[in-house]
Image (cartoon, grey):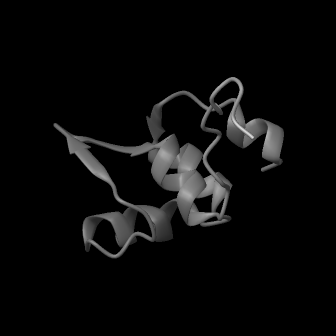
Amino acid sequence: MAAAELMALPVSFDLDTANRALALGRTTGYALAKNGEYPVRVLRLGRQYRVTRYDLLRFLGFQSQEPTEAGAA
């Protein structure tokens, strides 16, 4: 998955999308999530697994895009 695609992800998304970003197969990704061994934090909402963009980008080494103060040197 390209950097532009990663930055365009919604705040949270399904495990299949996270698997694609991490180059994991579907079966492997779901097995890791079920066993609590997924490389990023996984949220369990009912029967769904969700991953946040923040956790994924942090794991992949992207720096946060925090706004800088106006007039700061």
* Closer to the camera in the image, 5 or 66: 66
What residue is drawn where x is 55% and y is 64%? 59
- Where residue 64 appears, x then y in whole percent? 60, 47
Name of the residue lying farthest toward the left: 46
Q: Quadrant of residue 68?
A: top right
- The quadrant of the picture occupied by the C terminus is top right
Please say if 72 is above or below 35.
Answer: above
Please say if 60 is above or below 51.
Answer: below
- Where residue 56 appears, x then y in whole percent? 53, 54
Please say if 5 is above or below 69.
Answer: below
What residue is drawn where x is 65% and y is 40%? 65
What residue is drawn where x is 65% and y is 64%? 61
Please say if 69 is above or below 47.
Answer: above
What residue is drawn where x is 27% and y is 48%? 43
- Where residue 26 appears, x then y in whole percent? 53, 59
* Closer to the camera in the image, 3 or 15: 3
Q: Quadrant of residue 48?
A: top left
6 vs 3, left or right, is left
36 vs 71, left or right, is left
* Closer to the camera in the image, 29 or 69: 69
- Where residue 9 appears, x then y in whole percent? 62, 32
Q: Quadrant of residue 33?
A: bottom left
The image shows a total of numbered marks equal to 0
